[in-house]
Image (cartoon, helix red, strand yellow):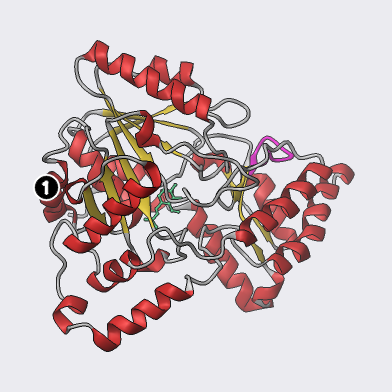
Amino acid sequence: MIPQHYKEMLSHKSVIRQVSEYGAARAAEIGAENVFDYSLGNPSVPAPAEFTAEMRRLLAEAEPVALHGYSPSLGISSVRAAVAESLKDRFGLPYETRHIFMTSGAAGAIAHAFRAVCEPGDEVVTFAPCFPEYGPYAAGAGLRLRYAACLPDFQPDLASLEALITEKTAAVLINTPNNPTGAVYSPKSMQGLADLLREKSARLGRPVYLISDEPYREILFEGVSAPYTACLYKDTLTCYSFSKSLSLPGERIGYLAICPGCEGEDILADVCGQISRGTGHNCPPSMIQLAVAKVLGKTADLSVYETNMRLLYDELAALGFTCPRPGGTFYIFPKALEEDAAAFCERAKRYDLLLVPSDSFGCKGYFRMAYCTDTGKVRRSLPALRALAQSYKTGR
Ligand code: PLP
């Protein structure tokens, strides 16, 4: 029998994907250049040339088994060592090979982190608005996801978090720089969060783990600095992805980094290896592991995202939208011009402007724009944005 809960999911499909599918169908009708599709967080810039060159070199020179064979379950040892070394250099924590578990993107890292430190039935608290897939990720691990609030500037509301931490709470899940808001949690917020978790862990007599989802770590604007979470709180599992920083989402590659000194550090990577026997997220592609190991610390040219952010932010502000200025990522999250965000986004389609309503991000009345697209297109979309705002003034 097909399980009922999967059948129920069919009527709650990813809204982002639905808008993106609509965009593809509309592009086939009127041409992709005429559709202002701000739905999917699919990076628009090429992977760094060094990555492509390394892929070519590997294809030409590497042994077939090294290239196309199964990876060890925890990841290729030399790759894990290179990741640990790179984290040690960048953030000053004494990572070793044993702290790194290679995964299929951040999604794979979160799947393992959830199972490694939570029992089915436990609670995990995150901050809303948040990435909608956290719901299915938690449900798949048998966890109850609870939502703390954000402040109006989308910094985490620590009082709201505090009220939700109970003896059932196994972990707190954060994402900074944040999808969908573009907020980068400030040093003050992060310090407050770490202090709160230390206090709660002491009271509960066990660690409340911090699962830090960081696929946008390198996409920062205008000199904003983002504290490295694990430097502030030792019981941190960092979920990283090369999807956004290297523009490789289709290659499905990332890692879980267990903070040195974390409770269970000696066995957590091994535990993840056992978990991967059941999740199906096992043995990420060998060739891609080898290639990313050669470009650690490098990124694609991410500057277009800041250019796009400025263009959109300035236009949205001029049109009267309420919207905190993003500090990173390639998302912006303004307030819709009517209470019903879905109706607002539906109206935007009249102008072939494809926006994602906020409801599936866990809050009402906003919309998300993913501006990982070329700047020329962002410029050409501005008249559509103006026409949409104007339609609310004229009532037509
Ligand atoms: N976490 C957040 C906040 C994301 O935005 C995404 C993808 O968009 C993911 C996790 C999953 O990323 P990956 O492609 O690395 O699995």
| Residue sitting nearer the eye, 156 or 101 | 101
Q: Residue 149, position in %: x, y?
A: 50, 25
| Residue sitting nearer the eye, 226 or 283 | 226
Does residue 380 appear to the left or right of 122 in the view shown?
right
Residue that protrudes farthest toward the top in the picture: 203
Look at the image and say whether residue 328 sits in the magenta stretch: no
Q: Residue 168, position in %: x, y?
A: 25, 21
* Mark 1: few/some/many CA within 10 Å (<14, 14-19, 20+): some
Q: Quadrant of residue 135?
A: top left
Instruction: Give me the residue at 51% from left, 42% from top.
Output: 178
| Residue sitting nearer the eye, 250 or 255 | 255
The answer to whether residue 283 of the structure is visible from this angle is no
Instruction: Give me the residue at 54% from left, 62% from top.
Output: 20
Q: Quadrant of residue 94?
A: top left
Q: Main secondary structure of the magenta part?
A: loop
Residue stretch in magenta = 334-341
Amino acid type assigned to the residue bearing label 1 in the image? Asp
Q: Residue 96, position in %: x, y?
A: 21, 47
Q: Name the residue carrying label 1.
A: 270
Instruction: Give me the residue at 55% from left, 40% from top.
Output: 225
